[in-house]
Amino acid sequence: MRSKISMMMLAAAAGVGLGATSAMADYTFPTYNPSSYNPSSQGWVGTTWNNIDLVTFNGGSVPVDTYIGYNVVYNWTKLPGVGGGTYQYNSEASMAFTSAPVTGSSSTLTGGGTLYTAQQNVSTAAAPGAGGSYPYSAAVSSATTKTNNQFYGGFSTNYAGGTDPLYFNFRQRFDSTGSGQNANWSNISITLRTSLTTPTPPPATPPTVDYDFGALPGSFPNVVMSPDIALDGASKKVAWFKFTAASAMAAHDIFSMGSTILGSLGGVGDTVMGLYNSTGGLVGSNDDYSYPAAPWSRIGVGTGSGHDPDGDGPLSAFGSGSLSSLAAGDYYVALTGYASGYSFGPGFDVTGTNTNAGTVKLNIVPTPSTMALLGLGGLVATRRRRR
């Protein structure tokens, strides 16, 4: 199966601009509900692209202006109880702004005319528009419902408004039900932006830390390990770790090997991990390194540590990470046992749903390092897409 790695590069959410008709002002369309225009679907969204003709929907025109970006806010609910219906993820929501409707169900856009921007999932950055790139935000989650999900970013080609055609296209990237219907999108609010500024993260109180690695240099000789942190599956479901990157880190692995907590599907050491910066921005997340043989979580940084987790066993070395690097600064890692419904949101907002008692451990593996210090092995290079 496909690797289930949900990496996220996030900044804090930005507010939706108010509609206006004067020059150089953001413009917000009326709220859109797909089920209102296609009652037979009840708003369920699958892998086939859905389209909104925004100009027609808006009464035939959009205020003339130079729009260089967008903000999309919507509510999301997974389709319950159909086949693999528990496996949709709001992080697999996809959207594109184009001058003609996108057709088909491929990540490679068919039709569409002028492409203003596209996000194939919420972990893919939007193309920069005039005025610079604009961060976007959405939580990584397997939760049943997520409200106020957001896409926002810059257009690669400016939109002029008026009667120039503009389509909002949206879909889910993965059909886990086999039914073609996967998730409900509702209360879709679309704002066209005339200016792009990096949003200021909302105040976030750092979590109480269970173990602090202290300051780590850009390179160090051996793996550093936390002690075992006990979770009780009730009042304490999430363990928090902290480390300070004294300089940029670009060849490391953050790994939960050595955890013993039982995942909800029975995997020993089956964890999920979220990495946060000092302001509560979610930098990245991961479920499994290689399930079911190796259910530990791994976030790779830069070229990765380059080490084989089981020594001279059958596995190849760690490959490059999904994060290009980590800048100097404070970082927090949330670690919890896997169970459906977990989520990593901005502002250190972590929901742990595993009710088993057990321990978790965090390792930071540099290049070079001595993986044998972990005293664990037997990983098998089997990757999976879904549970």
Image (spheres, rainbow, N blue to C red):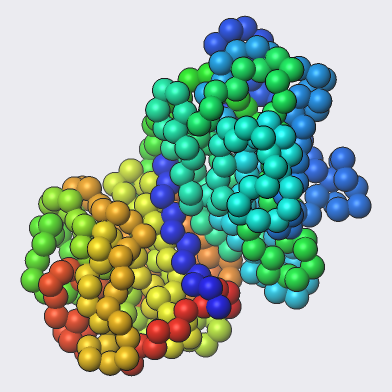
State the residue lying farthest toward the top: 22
Residue 190 or residue 171, whichever sits in front: 171
Where residue 180 appears, x then y in whole percent? 77, 63
Residue 367 or residue 187, whichever sits in front: 367
Measured along the vertical axis of the image, is residue 10 above or below residue 61? below
Residue 340 or residue 65, whichever sits in front: 65
Q: Residue at x 44, y 54 (%)?
A: 8
Q: Is residue 376 left or right of residue 246?
A: right
Where residue 334 appears, x then y in whole percent? 37, 63
Measured along the vertical axis of the image, is residue 153 above or below residue 228? above
Q: How many marks?
A: 0
Q: Residue at x 75, y 66 (%)?
A: 80
User: Is residue 339 visible in the rendered structure shown here?
Assistant: no
Residue 347 or residue 296, whichever sits in front: 296
Q: Residue at x 68, y 69 (%)?
A: 176
Position of the N terminus, as image quadrant, is bottom right
Position of the C terminus, as image quadrant, is bottom right
Q: Residue at x 14, y 75 (%)?
A: 369
Where residue 7 appears, x then y in whole percent? 44, 59
Measured along the vertical axis of the image, is residue 8 above or below residue 55? below
- Which quadrant would residue 284 be assigned to in this image? bottom left
Measured along the vertical axis of the image, is residue 66 above or below residue 70? above
Where residue 142 appears, x then y in whole percent? 58, 63
- Which quadrant would residue 358 be assigned to in this image? bottom left
State the residue lying farthest toward the left: 221
Q: Is residue 237 left or right of residue 361?
A: right
User: Is residue 144 visible in the rendered structure shown here?
Assistant: yes
